[in-house]
Image: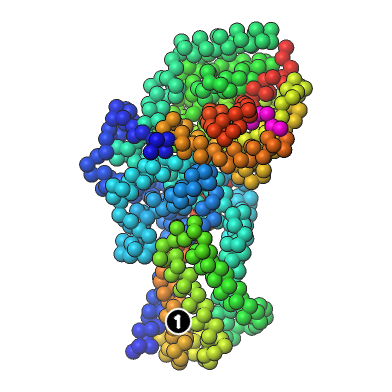
């Protein structure tokens, strides 16, 4: 089981989230009741459970299926874990003819399967692209995880992170003084490297712009180089900006666990910090699911942010901001400064399929590429079946980025690794660029298992920052 | 007596199919949709969304991305079925001018398309390991039922002579609750009985996907 089973949340973590610490005695009745409530309150879930025809279109589209060859990882099989129970308890045919329509009673073994397989899904929605009914497996996975947590079976990794972000302000549990130290030493590094005094402000009350970024950007490699890139761009554009110690995290792991109430609370921190700092612009750093939440869910979760300036009435992606500056000649990029690098771009699933960017349909696919093209002399594309809307997940998204799932993560990265290897062989690609903290961590740690240790995983804004003409 | 009973049953099946399908549409429509989950890149206008749905409903665009064989088989089956059903309109309304049904001369081809589509879909379900793994008995039975309806229809067309005027009288009588005698002939009874079963299960089975797709938030929501 090592590397393919994720630890169940400890009682103290569950209780912090007002959930039962261990599996409740009447788990069966509670789970069925919760399933009914979710079906009644989420149209997508209900339609998706009702309309699958078992056509098989999705069966070979999931990176975890392709990597593990486990039929339980076919998207429709994953959905059926929940659908069969829904049919048994909430449909006429399933109640009276369970054997005919594949309806099942929920028992301990099936509950265990729920836990195993709903935590072998990164909620990347690639299967949805190919489903003729538009069925979104991630909604089913989220519902399954929500029900599991509600009867006492949360996932330690995600639930612990949600408690940290609630208590301290970021997923890593870094407090304000520690953050200030990190930022100060980064300022010194930049000064030493470039001779320019680029600031990384924290809780600056005079700032016009709040930047919220995944906390991995503060210290992890290769993330931190991306954050240095944001700071250089903002410096060069002459923008007065700041981080917030209270909202020092863009990520929102409650999306992964399907817990809408916690998702709202975590999103609310960002709004509250923006109001408190009295900023007129809000920018989100390189983080896939954070961008989905900011782009698609921020308004419905915490209301429209009327305090933002009319020209930018909603949260902007850092790529969108840099792109705007580049087009308006607010910054200059010199690609020759990245000479020798051959770069390919990995579309992060939540950006490509769960959000947009800029004013044009598909901007989330074109804007990062235009930034790369302006920053690096040679950019090559991986196979079309593995990029854009059809991009393969890195294998670590959706609450999967934990050591106890390492085996599944390595296998799940197989399709991405194959596409990457192809361009390494044909075009001698040296760098794989992503705009998601999870993608960066996951790909850095699993690519060596696919004999791709020589490919450097990079933040997009690392390359932008290196190409930037800084004064 | 049995004429009336058959008429009542057929009428019930038709009204049930329409009523229960409408009910399901109402339930889908009234279920809250708290967070927008369009599959992006998504259209940003209502017209764009309508275009996206039309492409899915009439061209099975996503299926075309996924598997060519299933896509072609599905197109053959669904469009064959559509034409065959349109031709049934004339059985019920014999006075309808043929000019309104210009494709009626292709009825044999339509039936052939429908049946060959069904055969490929069944073969795929049996022969492809992945698809067999996810299939329940009802998945095979739906195909078998449709094939039996098509086959009995083909026999009625070529082998078992049938008085279509009587069939039309019976169906119109059932729908307007003015019961008419059952048409003569074993074959037509089988065909009508199978069609009745199809109508009965339509709203409570996966067959309802045809309307369900319109409520799929990944497809019918726009990006804003």
Q: Where is residue B90 shown, x and y percent of the image?
A: 57, 82
Q: Residues within 10 Å of mark 1 (few under 14, many from 20)?
A: many
Q: Could you tell whether B185 is left or right of B73 in the image? A: left
Q: On the rendered image, what quadrant is the C terminus of chain B found in?
A: top right
Q: Residue at x 63, y 28 (%)?
A: A454
Q: Answer whether residue B61 is magenta in the image.
A: no
Number of marks present in the image shown: 1
Q: Where is residue A252 shown, x and y percent of the image?
A: 46, 31
Q: Answer whether residue A431 is magenta in the image.
A: yes
Q: Main secondary structure of the magenta part?
A: loop
The answer to whether residue A129 is above or below residue A426 is below
Q: Residue at x 53, y 85 (%)?
A: B155
- A463 or B202, which lies in front? A463
Q: Residue at x 35, y 58 (%)?
A: A103
Chosen colour scheme: rainbow
Q: Where is residue A269 shown, x and y percent of the image?
A: 45, 25
Which segment is the magenta one? A428-432
- Residue B166 seen in the figure: yes
The answer to whether residue A89 is above or below residue A372 is below
Q: On the rendered image, what quadrant is the N terminus of chain B found in?
A: bottom left
- Residue A33 seen in the figure: no
Q: Residue at x 52, y 12 (%)?
A: A182
Corner quadrant of residue A1 = top left
What secondary structure is marked by label 1? helix
Q: Could you tell whether A169 is left or right of A331 in the image? A: left
Pinpoint the chain carrying mark 1: B
Q: Where is residue A314 shown, x and y percent of the image?
A: 57, 31
Return the residue at label 1: B192
- A308 or A347, which lies in front? A347
State the residue lying farthest toward the left. A25
């Amino acid at each position: 089981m090592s590397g393919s089973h994720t630890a169940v949340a400890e009682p103290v973590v569950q209780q912090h989230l007002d959930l039962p610490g261990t599996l409740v005695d009447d788990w069966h009745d509670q789970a069925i009741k919760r399933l009914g409530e979710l079906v009644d309150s989420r149209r997508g879930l209900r339609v998706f459970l009702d309309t699958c025809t078992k056509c098989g279109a999705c069966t070979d589209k999931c990176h975890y299926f392709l990597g593990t060859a486990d039929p339980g990882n076919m998207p429709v099989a994953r959905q059926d874990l929940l659908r069969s129970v829904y049919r048994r308890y909430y449909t006429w045919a399933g109640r009276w003819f369970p054997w005919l329509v594949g309806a099942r009673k929920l028992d301990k073994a099936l509950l265990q399967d729920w836990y195993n397989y709903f935590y072998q899904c990164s909620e990347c929605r690639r299967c949805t692209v190919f489903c003729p009914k538009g069925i979104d497996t991630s909604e089913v996975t989220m519902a399954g995880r929500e029900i599991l947590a509600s009867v006492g079976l949360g996932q330690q990794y995600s639930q612990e992170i949600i408690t940290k972000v609630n208590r301290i302000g970021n997923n890593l549990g870094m407090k304000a003084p520690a953050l200030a130290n990190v930022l100060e030493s980064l300022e010194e590094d930049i000064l030493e490297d470039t001779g320019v005094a680029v600031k990384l402000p924290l809780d600056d009350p005079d700032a016009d712009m709040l930047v919220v970024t995944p906390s991995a950007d503060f210290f992890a490699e290769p993330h931190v180089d991306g954050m240095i890139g944001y700071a250089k761009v903002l410096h060069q554009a002459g923008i007065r900006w700041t981080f917030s110690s209270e909202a020092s995290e863009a990520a929102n792991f409650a999306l992964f666990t399907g817990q809408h109430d916690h998702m709202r609370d975590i999103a609310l921190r960002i709004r509250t910090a923006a109001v408190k700092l009295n900023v007129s612009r809000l920018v989100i750093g390189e983080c896939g699911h954070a961008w989905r939440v900011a782009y698609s869910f921020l308004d419905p979760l915490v209301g429209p942010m009327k305090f933002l300036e009319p020209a930018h009435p909603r949260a902007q992606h850092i790529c969108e901001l840099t792109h705007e500056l580049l087009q308006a000649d607010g910054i200059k990029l010199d690609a020759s400064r990245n000479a020798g690098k051959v770069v390919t771009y990995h579309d992060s699933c939540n950006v490509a399929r769960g959000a947009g960017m800029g004013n044009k349909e598909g901007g989330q696919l074109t804007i990062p590429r235009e930034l790369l093209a302006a920053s690096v002399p040679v950019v090559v594309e991986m196979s079309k079946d593995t990029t854009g809307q059809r991009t393969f997940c890195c294998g670590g998204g959706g609450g999967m980025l934990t050591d106890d799932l390492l085996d599944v993560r390595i296998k799940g990265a197989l399709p991405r690794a194959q596409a990457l290897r192809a361009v390494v062989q044909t075009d001698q690609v040296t760098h794989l660029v992503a705009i998601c903290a999870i993608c960066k961590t996951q790909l850095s740690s699993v690519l060596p298992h696919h004999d791709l240790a020589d490919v450097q995983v990079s933040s997009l804004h690392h390359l932008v920052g290196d190409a930037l003409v800084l004064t | 007596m049995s004429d009336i009973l058959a008429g009542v049953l057929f009428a019930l099946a038709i009204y049930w199919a329409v009523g229960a399908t409408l009910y399901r549409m109402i339930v889908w429509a009234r279920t809250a949709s708290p967070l927008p989950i369009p599959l992006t890149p998504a259209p940003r206008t209502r017209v764009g969304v309508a275009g996206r749905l039309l492409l899915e409903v009439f061209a099975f665009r996503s299926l075309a991305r996924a598997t060519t064989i299933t896509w072609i088989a599905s197109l053959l089956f669904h469009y064959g079925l559509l034409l065959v059903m349109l031709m049934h309109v004339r059985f019920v309304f014999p006075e309808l001018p043929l000019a309104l049904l210009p494709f009626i001369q292709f009825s044999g081809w339509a039936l052939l398309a429908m049946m060959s589509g069904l055969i490929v879909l069944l073969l795929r379900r049996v022969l492809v390991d992945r698809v067999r793994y996810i299939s329940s008995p009802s998945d095979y039975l739906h195909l078998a039922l449709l094939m039996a309806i098509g086959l009995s229809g083909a026999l009625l067309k070529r082998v078992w002579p049938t008085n279509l005027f009587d069939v039309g009288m019976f169906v119109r009588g059932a729908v307007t609750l003015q019961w008419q005698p059952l048409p003569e002939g074993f074959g037509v009874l089988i065909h009508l009985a199978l069609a009745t079963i199809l109508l009965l299960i339509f709203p409570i089975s996966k067959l309802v996907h045809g309307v369900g797709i319109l409520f799929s938030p990944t497809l019918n929501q726009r990006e804003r």
